[in-house]
Amino acid sequence: MDPASTLENPIVVAGLLTQAVGAGVLAVLLQRFHRQLGRGYLRDWALAWVAIAIAFAGGAWSVLVMSDLPAYHWSRLLTTAAFTIGSFWHAAWLLFGTVAIVRGRPVSRRGGRAILGALAALGLAATLLWAYDPVAAPQRLLARVGVRSLVLAVALLSAGALLGRVARRGGSATGPGFVSLAFLACGAKNLVGLAAALGWLPLPAWISAPVDVMLTGLLGLATVVWLLEEEQHRLRDASRQIERFAFYDVATGLPNRKLFVDRFRSWLERAGREGEPGALLFLDLDHFKRVNDGWGHEVGDQTLAAVADRLLHAVREGDTVGRLGGDEFTVLMPGVTGVPEATRLAAGLLERLRQPFHVGTHELSVRGTAGIALCPGDGRDAAVLLRKADSAMHRAKEIERGSFVVYDAALADASRERFALEEALREGRLEAGLELHFQPIVRSGSGEIHGAEALLRWRHPERGLLAPGEFLFAAESAAVSEAISRWVLRAACGAVADWRQRHLPELKVAVNLTARSLEDPGLAGMVTAALEESGLPASALELEITETMALLQIQDPASILAELRARGTRVAVDDFGTGYSSLSYLRELPVEVVKLDSSFIRDLGRRPRDSRIVGAVIQLAHGLGMEVVAEGVEEESQMAVLEMLHCDRMQGYLFSHPLPRAEFESLLEVARPFRTTSFQTAGYLSL
């Protein structure tokens, strides 16, 4: 609307001021919604209403203050140009925001600047046309009002049509449809304004101004309705997300502990009424910590998600899988009638887990150990059944990782004993009861003491002397296994360093490493600290691992053992023959000593086949530059055969049981070789 054509019309002034205030308020609201929701189109629409607010304010100022000035006065021209360009930019930014909604991405900055620049040039040209011709008022009205109405009509009708598509896609959403109708109505009004500028349709100011106010208010109201609807949807989505975080595990999407226990209790109530049996499986992933330590927690979370997906595809329809936390999963299996069916299902689940997992570019081996509790035999309370399934799982880990155990009454006593041990360890009564016993390792042929194997014991205040198998698992549960490993290394190195000074200068010591300590990234530093503190040479320390540990439990055993070797310590494979007995890995790992398990030695001298097997292993180890130690030597016949087979060293009850430190030192003081001359080897060795 050309202010020059309605200089004395107070209705126009009131309409312009009303629209300016309304546009400013709406711009503030849109900007606040933009900050809250982060939607790019809201910023464009806020700028659109800022532009039109400035335009309306400028138009009102022109009518009130500059009505006596000629149309070509520079201040009138400047105000008119601002009014026209502001209207053009209003239309442009409304269209920019609409296009961003439809396309899902904003208009490029470069393209937006070009369009705004072109519209500014068009507005300036429309303002200057016929500005200095006092008799060209009709042409001036057409250039200013007509062009502005045409640009606004095209922009608003286009925006309305685009938002109509969004409204149809949105289904039940009313906001986009309301704004689309408001855009179309404003566009139609500007077409009427164009017709009036062309002289086709009379449009008095007392009609045009109120209609402009009404349509501007309608467009603002429609926009606010849409934004309130968007906020309602956002709050609803946030509520759903919060609910999902509260009841579902983020990494796997499985029900978390709270939701699983709630569902478990609901099923128990229904099963109690209907007499339906069932089973609860408690699954723990074996050595999952190495995945997080070796590949990072992101890969760890992806692996957990892969495990969850595999479990979901492995269980029956109607079973419920949950993640209690960490690497612990549970499976509720309704309808399981007894132990045979429960064991069959558990075996199938564990077998599926044994298949490699492909996570990104990694191929990972993840195994699980499970415990099973049956309902109603083991109870009908959720907490009781979870505790019993957990106890069965821990028992399975003690027996063999990767297996499963069904709960029975005997496990209750074992669980109480394990809990008591864990409590004792947590209460700090550990080091006061730890002891090292030493068993001599002798040289073949001479019978002289070559070294000693340090064997850990714990003198429990009530149960007496315990072997490692009776308390190390509890130590891992109580998170004190690292402290135990550090104590063993310090005590063993300190004792042997003392004996080397006072008895045998070349004495060596063998220390067993646990799987947990071999996974510890600080192991090499722990070994170095023990050697430096005791003064024991690194070459006098021999670290023993089992072949099962080397093959299955450690992500990269070669690099870990190589670091230990680089610091001067020796590495031995203990209990050789009890695991996979894979001779190829001996070539790949930095191993210097092979310790034959006692099962190979037991029938030496009575079964020629055993002699041939042991002889072949000794020859292979020697060919690889390794020494061989035979464990479990209890008879003179076994010693004689091993000497004939050129075994390097021997260890067993024939020479000595494991002895406390004081008794072992007495053995060193005697310094008598372990030799038996009455035994003849003829007839016992057949190769």
Image (cartoon, rainbow, N blue to C red):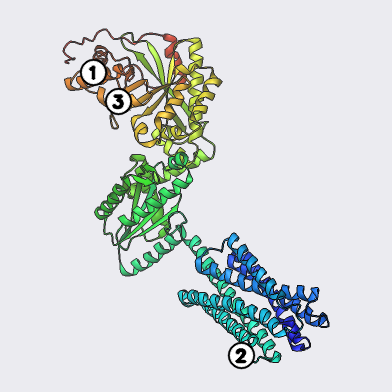
Q: Which mark is residue 440?
A: none
**Nearest to the observer: residue 273 or residue 150:** 150
Specify few, some or many for label 1: CA neighbours under 10 Å numbering under 14, 14-19, or 20 or more. Answer: some
Q: Residue at x 58, y 75 (%)?
A: 155
Which residue position holds label 2? 200
Q: Earlier in the sequence, mark 1 or mark 2?
A: 2
Q: Is residue 605 left or right of residue 534?
A: left
What is the spatial separation of the Cα atoms under label 1 and label 2, in whole angstroms? Answer: 115 Å
Q: Position of residue 128 (x, y in %)?
A: 72, 74
Front residue of 28 and 530: 28
- The reply to whether residue 452 is visible in this rendering is yes
What percent of the width, then of the height, locates residue 535?
Answer: 54, 17
Which residue is identified by label 1? Answer: 615
Q: Amino acid at mark 1?
A: Gly
Rate crowding at label 3 as few (under 14), some (14 to 19) or many (20 or more) other CA atoms within 10 Å.
some
Judge depth for marks 2 and 3 and give the one in front.
2
Residue that label 3 marks: 597
Q: Is residue 257 above or below residue 529?
A: below
- Report the Cα–Cα distance between label 2 and label 3: 109 Å
Q: Image height check: is 183 above or below 466?
A: below
Secondary structure of residue under mark 3: loop
Q: Secondary structure at mark 2?
A: loop
Specify few, some or many for label 2: CA neighbours under 10 Å numbering under 14, 14-19, or 20 or more: few
